[in-house]
Amino acid sequence: MVFRSRRCLTEAYPCAARLILVFGGRSVDCIRDLLVNELIVRFALGGVAVSLFSALAEIFKPKSFSGILGAAPAVALVSLGLTFEQRGNSVVRDHGLGMICGGVGFLAYACACVFTTSNQRLPVWVGAAVCWAFWFLVAAAAWLTVKPS
Amino acid sequence: MKPKVDLSGLTKPKAWEHALRFLFGGIVALIASVTSKALGDFVGGLALAFPAILPAALTLVKEHDGRKQATEDARGARYGALGLIGFAAVIYLCASQGPTIALPLAMLTWATIAVSAWWIGDGRQT
C-alpha cells in the first residue's frame, strides 16, 4: 500500500500525524520508510534482549531466584537506548517516570500471580492473564497520581 | 540457600519456546514504541513496564517443572519488580547524564535491589 499524500497517511494512521511533525518537511514515503525501519529494529532488538534474559533465567536455580529475571527490564533497556539516541535525554526522563508507575503495577501483578499460579483449579496462563487487570488498575492509579500536567 | 548455575537448563526449552519468547519481546518493544508516539512519552514508559512476558514464562515453567516451581518463579518476579521500580527511578533521575551513565547505573540498581530482596525474602532460608 503506497501513500500518495500526507492526508492519506494521516487518515489511515492518526499517530502518523505526530510523526510528520517530528520529521518536519520530509516526504511521506521517507517518513513511512523511517517508521518501518525503526519498528523492525525495535522488534528485533526487543526479541533478542528478551531471549537472552530468558536463557539466563534457565541456568539459575532455585526458581525463586531465576524468577527475578522474569521482571528484568530487557525491552526497556533496548527501547531506552534507542530513545536516548533518537529523541534525547528529556524524552527518556518522561519514559522513566512512566516506568516507575508501570513498575509499581508490575509488583502488584507479580504478587497476584503468586496466588493465581498456586491455585490448582486455575490454568496458569488464565490466572496470569486475569492478573493483568491488577497491573492496569495499579499503574493507572499511580499514573493519575504523578502524571505531568 | 545460595543461587546455583546449571548450564544444562539451557537445553530444556524447545526451539518454538525460544521463538515464542523472541516474538513476545519484539511485540512488547513495538507496542511501547507505537504507544509512545501515539499517546505520549509518559504512557510509552508505562508500556515499557507491562508484564507481557511473564505469563508465557510461568506457563512454560509449569509445563516443564510443575505448578510449585511456577509459583516459585512468580515469587521471584516480585523481587524483580522491586528492582524494576529502582531501574525506572534511576532512569528518571539520571537521564540527563546520558546513556553511558544512566543505563549501566539503572541495570546495576535493578540487579542490586532484586538480588537483595530475594536474599531477604527467600535466600536466608535453608
Image: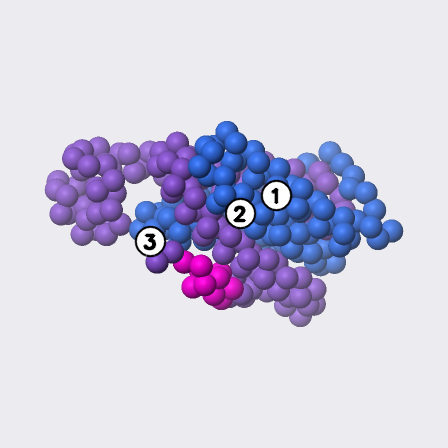
Q: Which residue is mark 2?
A: B89
Instruction: Identify the residue position indicated by label 1 in the image.
Output: B110
Q: Earlier in the sequence, mark 2 or mark 1?
A: 2
Q: Which residue is mark 3?
A: B39
Please give the range of residues in magenta: A137-147
Q: In which chain is the residue bearing label 2?
A: B
Q: Which chain can be seen in purple? A: A
- Asked whether disc 1 touches disc 3, contact meaning CB atoms under 8 Å apart, the reply is no
At 21% from the left and 47% from the top, the residue drawn is A17
On the image, the x and y values in percent for residue B17 come to 58, 44
Figure check: A27 above or below B24: above
Q: Earlier in the sequence, mark 1 or mark 3?
A: 3
Residue at the top extreme, as displayed: B100
The chain letter under disc 1 is B
The numbered mark, 3 or 2, whose residue comes first in the sequence reads 3
**Distance between the Cα atoms at labels 3 and 2?**
21 Å
- Mark 1 and mark 3, same subunit? yes
Q: Quadrant of residue A109?
A: bottom right
Q: Which chain is blue?
A: B
| Mark 2: amino acid | Ala
Q: Position of residue A58 (x, y in %)?
A: 68, 41
Q: Residue at x 50, y 39 (%)?
A: B94
Q: Compared to A65, does A104 lie above or below?
A: below
Q: Nearer the viewer, residue B32 or A61?
A: B32
Asked if A135 appears above or below A62 in the picture, the reply is below
Q: Give the residue type that dot 3 points to.
A: Leu
Tell me which secondary structure the magenta stretch mostly adopts.
helix
For mark 2, give the secondary structure.
helix
Identified at 62% across, 52% down, the residue is B82
Question: In the drawing, does residue B120 fall left or right of residue A97?
Answer: right
How far apart in space, not on screen, are marks 2 and 1 (Cα)?
Answer: 10 Å
Q: Residue at x 51, y 36 (%)?
A: B102
